[in-house]
Amino acid sequence: MEISGESSRLTEEEAARSDRYKHNSSMELFNEWLWRQEYWLPPGITWRDMAQMEDSPLPRDLLISLPLALGFIALRCAFERTVAVPLSKLLGVKDRVRLSVSPAPSLEAFYTKHSRHPAQSEVSSLVKKSGLTQKQVEVWFRHRRNQDRPSNTKKFCEASWRFVFYLISFTAGLASLINTSWFWDQRECWRGFPLQPVEKVHYWYYMIELGFYWSLLLCVSVDVKRKDFKEQIVHHIATIFLLGFSYCSNYIRIGTLVMLVHDSSDFLLESAKMFNYASWKKTCDSLFVVFAVVFLLTRLVVFPSKIIYTTLILSMEVFQPFMGYYFFNALLLVLQALHIFWAWLIMRMIYKFLFLGKLEKDERSDDESEAEEEAEDGEEEENQTSWKKRKVVLDSKLAMMTSSCVLNNLANQRANVCSRMPKSR
């Protein structure tokens, strides 16, 4: 019995070792497949060549971007509380007063567990459960959705945080690149590629940008949702992949130019949003015009003619196309497609400005249905306030009429008394 027990234990240990070995071997096979130098490096260059170079980029360096992302999230919370909120009050940002909803447990349960926009058949069912009319149920859901919409203060805080980061990032990036050779001549991006040492300032430029975009992706569920929510997700993911891959393959020189081109217009957009939420219309319109010009020039002219042309055409003068070449350019083309989409939105706003004489709110703002609901709520609030004003006017007129009637009665009584006095005498 003892021998059989020991043999069973040995069998279990051998099975466990075999499983660990299979797991380790599968991970090794995956690592070998993932980090094949044919995918990441041009022909004739190996990982050993990269390791022998001083100040060479290593894939494990990217891990520092994750704690940086968490640090950005903590710094953002502190910034919004200590700087953005007082600044919003100083600039006169005002939040709309939302109409409160009456307590309705059945409607609240459906709103939180199922959907914020019930279908017509679901509205009929909710009418039976709540005992309200169909119109009252629809109004209740509209008011409830508007209660969850972000306030102008929240939008201002988000825009001010991004404005500060993009402004600092663009200024620091321009200062670090203005004296480099590849800033003025993009052919220098490929001289000696990929055996190009990475300067410390460009290393931190990469890691800080990567950490910031990780923080945006982690906070996307709590940030203000706009019409281009899905496009923003695609943009953040494509940017993270682009930065990570370009760092490992030492596309850092061209990568720094990509980041600089993007940061050059982003801080102008965020500043225009800040003044829009503060109702500084003239300042907002002026900043938006400047942003539109810079965006259209950098994203539709500079980016394809300098960046994409350099990576697609000029790079082939140094090396033959490989897997990383196609992957890197595919990500750049994804970004360019998003640039065209956003340029179309900007052109719509410019059209409204030229032919309607004013800039409408951000085309990327909240959904149109929610904007219409907010307008309906505003009309209801205006109707209520106008009714209150009319009621005050009517009450004052009624009081004046009452007082005049009392005075007339007193005057008549005095006249009667005066007329009776001679007779009595």
Image (spheres, grey):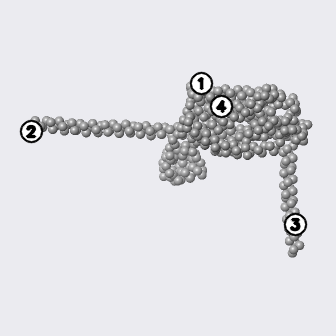
Q: Disc 1 to disc 2, how far (Cα)?
A: 87 Å
Q: Nearer the viewer, residue 85 or 416?
A: 85
Q: What residue sits 71% from the left and 29% below the top?
A: 299
Q: What residue sits 71% from the left and 40% below the top?
A: 212
- The mark found on residue 354 in the picture is 1
SS of the residue under disc 3? helix
SS of the residue under disc 1? helix
Q: Earlier in the sequence, mark 3 or mark 1?
A: 3
How many numbered circles does the render carry? 4
Q: Residue furthest left?
A: 425
Q: Quadrant of the C terminus?
A: top left
Query: Which amino acid type is shown beneath numbered disc 4?
Result: Leu
**Mark 2 = which residue?**
424
Looking at the image, residue 264 sits to the left or right of residue 133; the answer is right
Q: Disc 4 to disc 2, how far (Cα)?
A: 93 Å
Looking at the image, residue 302 sits to the left or right of residue 4; the answer is left
Res 319 → quadrant: top right
Q: Disc 4 to disc 1, how far (Cα)?
A: 20 Å
Mark 3 against mark 2, which lies toward the viewer? 2
Q: Earlier in the sequence, mark 1 or mark 2?
A: 1
Q: Earlier in the sequence, mark 3 or mark 2?
A: 3
- The mark found on residue 10 in the picture is 3
